[in-house]
Image (spheres, rainbow, N blue to C red):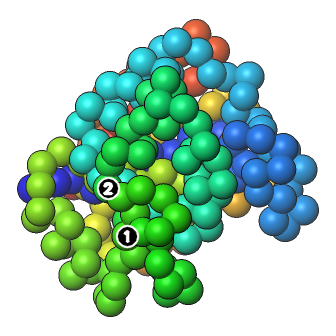
Amino acid sequence: MRQLIVVEFVTLDGVMQGLGSPDEDREGGFAYGGWGAPYGDDIQRDAALEGMQTTSAYLFGRRTYEKMLAFWPEQPDTNPMAAHLRATPKYVATRTLDDAQNTWANSEILRGDLVPALRRLQAEGDGTIAVLGSGNLVQQLAALDLVNGYRLFLHPLLLGSGKRLFSQLDQPQPLSLAGVQQTSTGVLMLSYDCL
């Protein structure tokens, strides 16, 4: 049975918005896009490559899917992330998109209620279903107790504004620390399993 794992890059104050580029996500007047660029290193790259080995599917919310769609399909297969994304099934949790299949190879819209759709995906294979970005979706998954674990890349940075990974939970959710590794730039790669 596949595990649902949330993979997020966050600042110390929990901001996940606009990691990659200045114009990635300016919603709410966010002016710090691209904050993650100075923190990339070989240790993070190697961790990402290792994570891809067990990832047998991806799950996105609509916004993240559309942002990924605007960039990754155009990247060459010499980029390991582009090659993996292209070859791996991608599922989109949305009520507003009609079709994902025709826009990015191996993409599919999840139809109907989220819980039975995800339970079906988990039962269909081995490895992990990785959730990248997709803050609103992550909030829903956590509230529905569907997350099996978190892989957080905690950056030594305070931004003070921006979308936070966790804004409200109905009840506390205990986690078990499964691993810690530090990068050369001070990022802590934290692995947590949900109890």
What percent of the width, then of the height, locates residue 7?
44, 45
Question: Given the current orientation, which residue lies at the most extreme front position?
Answer: 102
Q: Amino acid at mark 2?
A: Pro
Residue toward you, 166 or 134? 134
What percent of the width, then of the height, locates residue 136?
55, 70
Residue under the point 42% across and 46% down: 86
Quarter of the figure with the N terminus: bottom left
How packed mark 1 is, by other alpha carbons closer than 10 Å (few <14, some 14-19, many 20 or more), is: some
Using the image, tell me which numbered label, if any, was put on residue 89.
Answer: 2
Using the image, tell me which numbered label, if any, was put on residue 32.
Answer: none
Whether 161 is drawn above or below 140: the answer is above
* Disc 1 secondary structure class: strand
What percent of the width, then of the height, locates residue 193?
27, 46
Residue under the point 64% across and 47% down: 71
- Find out whether the residues at labels 2 and 1 contact each other: C-beta distance under 8 Å: yes
What percent of the width, then of the height, locates residue 6?
40, 51
Q: Is residue 158 left or right of residue 16?
A: right
Q: Which corner quadrant of the image does residue 110 belong to?
A: bottom left
Instruction: Count the numbered circles shown.
Output: 2
Residue under the point 37% across and 70% down: 108
Please give the residue where the numbered disc 1 appears in the rendered image: 108
Q: Amino acid at mark 1?
A: Glu
How packed mark 2 is, by other alpha carbons closer than 10 Å (few <14, some 14-19, many 20 or more), is: some
Whether 78 is drawn above or below 135: the answer is above
Mark 2 → mark 1, Cα distance in angstroms? 8 Å
* Disc 2 secondary structure class: loop
Residue under the point 18% across and 45% down: 127
